[in-house]
């Protein structure tokens, strides 16, 4: 009988589709146990960092848009 925990020593997958689904679900739950949930302070800090980064990127893209639109006006006229 095929081991539900993983592939057999010969490297074959479990043939039973239910055993494969069960193996997948066990692996998902094993990975979820490794997840570390951030504290409220860490979450607020990460959120602030992301928002500041997004604002900086918006400013850079807007600056490039302004420069290229001015350059297009100079080249092609208003």
Image (cartoon, rainbow, N blue to C red):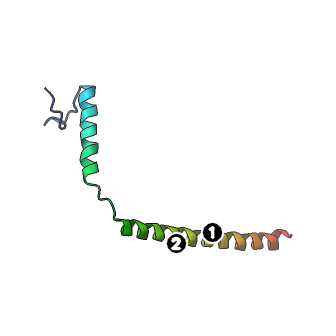
Residue 68 location (% of width, % of height) = 72, 70
- Which residue is at 27% across, 49% downward? 31
Residue 22 location (% of width, % of height) = 25, 33
Q: Quick one: label 1, few (<14), some, or many (20+) residues within 10 Å?
A: few
- State the count of labels: 2
Secondary structure under tag 1 reads helix
How many angstroms separate mark 2 from mark 1 (CA)? 14 Å
> Which is more N-terminal, label 1 or label 2?
2
> Quadrant of residue 15 in the image?
top left
The residue sitting at the right extreme is 78
| Residue 38 placement, left or right of 12 | right
Circle 1 residue: 61
| Residue 51 placement, left or right of 23 | right
Circle 2 residue: 52
Question: In the displayed structure, would residue 65 be above or below residue 1?
Answer: below
Secondary structure under tag 2 reads helix
């Amino acid at each position: 009988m095929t081991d539900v925990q993983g592939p057999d020593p010969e490297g074959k997958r479990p043939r039973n589709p239910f055993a494969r689904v069960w193996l997948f679900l066990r692996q998902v739950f094993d990975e979820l146990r490794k997840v570390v949930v951030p504290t409220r302070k860490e979450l607020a800090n990460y959120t602030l960092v992301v928002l500041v980064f997004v604002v900086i990127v918006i400013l850079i893209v807007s600056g490039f848009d302004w420069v290229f639109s001015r350059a297009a006006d100079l080249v092609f006229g208003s």
